[in-house]
Amino acid sequence: MPALDTNVLVRYVVRDDGAQHAAAKRLIARCVAEGAPLFVPVTVMLEFEWVLRASYGFRKSEILGTLSTLQSAAELSFQSEPALEVALQLWRESAADFADCLHVALAAQAGEQPLWTFDKAASAIDGARRLAKV
């Protein structure tokens, strides 16, 4: 199964470069026609959220909508999709960063909890605990 890098996904969604958007769109259309979904690594989703927020100024609600739409696309297959769904729900309900929500969700999926952190917002997520400074 072919996989997508963050920059291809960004160009497909943001459409800020016409030639790259067209190339990404052609690739996705070709894979759909061949019945070959594109694999999206969990690290790509982590970087994708960061790029939308830091480089394009997307608000949390816009990113949540975009990620949810991508997850429902039949032409895409996501690594650790159950954890990604949990991370999106945690992020929707908390003040923690998406990355922290994803870390907690992946740790839970692996059966490894709690996720110890110094981050106050992250420690408020169910499945995480704040490590006290001595």
Image: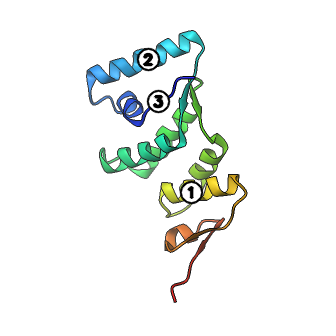
Q: Is residue 32 visible?
A: yes
Pointers 2 and 3 in contact (CB under 8 A)?
Answer: no
N-terminal-most mark, 1 or 2: 2
Q: Position of residue 102 (x, y in %)?
A: 56, 53
What's the residue at 67%, 44% (across, down)? Answer: 82
Q: Which residue is mark 2?
A: 27
What's the residue at 47%, 59% (across, down)? Answer: 97
Q: Is residue 62 visible?
A: no
Amino acid type, residue under disc 2 in the picture: Leu
The kind of secondary structure element at disc 3 is loop
The quarter holding residue 16 reads top left
- Decide which of 103, 21 is in the foreground and name it: 103
Badge 3: residue crowd in 10 Å (few <14, some 14–19, many ≥20): some
Q: Which residue is mark 3?
A: 4
What's the residue at 39%, 27% (across, down)? Answer: 12
Amino acid type, residue under disc 1 in the picture: His
- Residue 8 in the image: above or below residue 62: above
What's the residue at 48%, 14% (across, down)? Answer: 29
Q: Which residue is mark 1?
A: 103
The kind of secondary structure element at disc 2 is helix
- Residue 132 in the image: above or below residue 26: below
N-terminal-most mark, 3 or 1: 3
Amino acid type, residue under disc 3 in the picture: Leu
Image quadrant in which the N terminus is located: top right
The kind of secondary structure element at disc 1 is helix
The quarter holding residue 38 reads top right
